[in-house]
Image (spheres, rainbow, N blue to C red):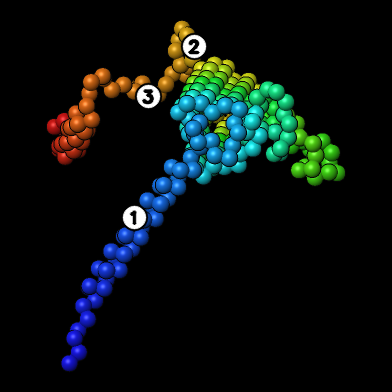
Amino acid sequence: MRVPINQNVFSSLAAWRRRAVSRAVHRGARWVREAAAVTAGRPGPYRFRRIGTGTRLAFPQGTVFGDPWIEIGDHCIIAQDVTLTAGMMPDLDLGPEPILTLGNGVVLGRGSHVIADVRLTIGDDCFFGPGVYVTTTNHSYDDPEVPVGKQWPRSDPVSIGPGSWIGTGAVILPGARLGRNVVVAAGAVVRGEVPDHAVVAGAPAKVVRRWDPAAGWQPPLRTPAPVPIPEGVTPEQLVALGEWAAEEAAEEAAAPAGEA
């Protein structure tokens, strides 16, 4: 007499094993990310000229070289796969002064590239979306007989003023000088000088909005300014407020036309 095999037992056991393996892999990956992150106390293989308190370079790091000529301020967040380079190639002597300087509180989004062959400075509290490309050097194409990639490049210093926001996929070209609290729209290509408190967009980027001390933003903003959360409001109160707002919106949507 054959005893029937309960397939559910084997299915449950296989599912349990998959869940256990998945949890173990995720725990291991989390441990690796934590252990391999670069901080002031754990600089890993790098010899940055300075890396500030509270700063963290997430693992995996992108290409990093010329680190003795790179200064990173306090409380910066450098996301995964961010490239930071000083000089045209590794192992060059770039002199006594820093080449690439990031101020305090700088955030560089995942996959961004900051390429400094000559002086490049990013001011305090600048925020970069993912995939931003900033470079002090561009290929030249003066000689029509020589491949562009083999011609000697042109370099020009770049500076980005404090408090600026650089949108996803933006490109900052050699010689760009961005003022304070500048907004660069996603995908913009910026060169030349951008004044303080300006919004630029397009390729090549142009000023599309500016702050006027007398008239405010010109042209005027199309949406009202966000209202900060009052001090003392708890997370539970915010959740309750969100649920109340959702109920109000549902009642308005359900009400017959003309009753609102």
* Nearer to the camera, 118 or 175: 118
Q: Amino acid at mark 3?
A: Thr
- Taking 159 as reference, is 252 left or right? left
Q: Determine whether label 1 and label 2 are within 8 Å by CB.
A: no
How far apart marks 2 and 3 lie (CA) works out to: 18 Å
Which residue shows up at 30% across the image and 68% down it?
A: 14
| Residue 156 visible within the image | no
Residue 237 image point, x, y percent: 19, 28
Q: CA distance from mark 1 to mark 3?
A: 44 Å
Q: With 135 as the anchor, is 148 left or right in this view?
A: right
Q: Nearer the viewer, residue 22 or 159?
A: 22
Q: Nearer the viewer, mark 1 or mark 3?
A: 1
Location of residue 149 with respect to 230 vertically, above or below: below
Neighbor class of circle 2 (other Cα within 10 Å; few <14, some 14-19, many 20+) is: few
The reply to whether the C-beta atoms of the residues labelled 1 and 3 are less than 8 Å apart is: no
Q: Amino acid at mark 1?
A: Arg
Quarter placement of the N terminus: bottom left
Q: Amino acid at mark 2?
A: Asp
Tag 3 or tag 1, which sits nearer the N-term?
1
Say which residue label 3 marks.
Answer: 223
| Residue bearing mark 1 | 23
Counting the numbered discs, the total is 3
Considering the numbered disc 2 on the image, is that residue within a helix, a strand or a loop?
Answer: strand
Q: CA distance from mark 1 to mark 2?
A: 55 Å
Q: In the depicted view, which residue is nearer to us: 230 or 171?
A: 230
